[in-house]
Amino acid sequence: MALTNIRGLYPHLKQDGVYFNHAAMGPMNILTQKAIDVYVKGRTIQPIDPFAQYLEWSNLLKENLSEMLNCTPDRLAWTDCVGNAMNMVAQGLEWNKDDHIILNDLEFPSNVYPFLNLEKQRVKVEIVSTENGVVSIEKIEAAITPKTKLISISHVQFLTGYRMDLVRLGEICKKHGIIFCVDVIQSSGVVPIDVEKMNIDFLAGGSHKWLMALIGLGYFYISEELQSKINQKYVGWTSVNDMWNLLDYNIEFREGADRFQNGGHSFIGVVALSASLQILMQIGIEKIEESILSNTDYLINSLSELGYNSILKYLPEENRAGIVSIKLDNAEKLSEALSKINVTVAVRQGILRMSPHYYNTKEDIDEFIARLKSVL
Ligand SMILES: Cc1ncc(COP(=O)(O)O)c(C=O)c1O
């Protein structure tokens, strides 16, 4: 599909605005909107309750998602949010006093609180400090002790946009027998993810950012080996093999990761993500990455010409993805001024964050820079 045709799928582009906030919430395209409309109509008029069909759609979507992550569909489960996926691992593993977990000081709280919550079980959570927005693999490696049981990290940092070399970190985890957990909400739909190549034991993401579907449907991948170590704390009617034998009360868990789906999940979320993912997969994640990295580079250079140094300015492509951030004294004020002229960016921790997607162009970036200049 040509980029011009793709841009036609996004109605927000026809309005007078610049939307560079995919790291918070991705706009939907018209095909996703239509799929949702059809779903809502079906729920309103007929057929109202095609439950078996919904499950088929869910399974089909898992097949597509598994292609994107290089796993088998049975290793995927639906969740509502990243935080709950991380909680499932944190609460499901057996912890001994002084077991050690490594995080870093740039992680989004969904990837921190579930592990910090284990401190009351006398687990030690070490938060490695970062420098200039960069999470150093060397520092993480140096923090490893014989007690280190788990490392959790974002593929792409929400605040600075730093992209971690997961292949290298995965190798380190494998070498030390450490459980490797990854938050991919800022990288799926942006750059390739390969759970095999990256030796990932567990990853979690959501659908409303770069995958441009609805909030409320998240997913996780769990390796067979990690699943075998989890003592499943929460169970529901869809966790078991013979789920339609409703009065059998036999907790015989499903083999796959869907055992962690304890009841009905967001089918409207499935419908939306199916439509959205179809487009992304038609384009291909490598092409998407290429376009995003080219936008990121152009935006970094354009900001630099204005005298603003992005946090990722001196880093190579491998450590960049879709987020470009600048540290400013007046980020809040600037963002407010930009919003008055229909430019949407985000401010997090006093940092101005811009996140254009693959369908954005150099012209969009030039327009953004022109509007930014007008409010400076
Ligand atoms: C890195 C990262 N993880 C997780 C989330 C969201 O967490 P949850 O799905 O638990 O709401 C965000 C942003 O909202 C994020 O930037």
Image (tube, grey):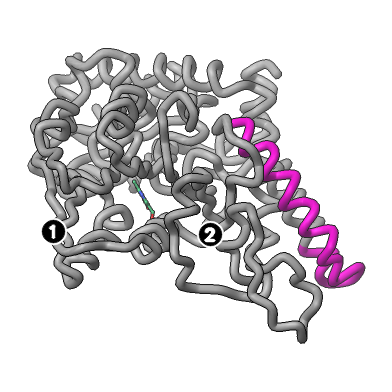
Q: Which quadrant would residue 128 be assigned to in this image?
A: top left
Residue 338 in sight here: no
Q: Give percent across and percent down for residue 376.
A: 18, 33
Q: Give percent across and percent down for residue 131.
A: 8, 32
For badge 1, the amino acid type reads Asp
- Specify the farthest residue to the right: 46
Question: Is residue 45 located in the magenta-colored stretch of the structure?
Answer: yes
Residue at the spot 16% in from the left edge and 34% down from the top edge? 140
Q: Which quadrant would residue 27 be assigned to in this image?
A: top right
- Specify the farthest residue to the bottom: 247
Which is more toward the observer, 28 or 164? 164
Disc assigned to residue 79: 2
Q: Mark 1 highlights which residue?
A: 98
Q: What quarter of the picture does the N terminus occupy?
A: top right
Q: Is mark 1 within 8 Å of ligand 1?
A: no
For badge 2, the amino acid type reads Thr
Residue at the spot 23% in from the left edge and 66% down from the top edge? 118
Residue at the spot 31% in from the left edge and 24% down from the top edge? 165
Counting residues from the start of the chain, the first of labels 2 and 1 encountered is 2
129 lies left or right of 274: left
39 lies left or right of 185: right
The magenta region covers: 40-68
Q: Which quadrant would residue 141 be assigned to in this image?
A: top left
Tally of marks: 2
Q: Secondary structure at mark 1?
A: loop
Residue 145 in sight here: yes
Which is more toward the observer, 356 or 46? 46
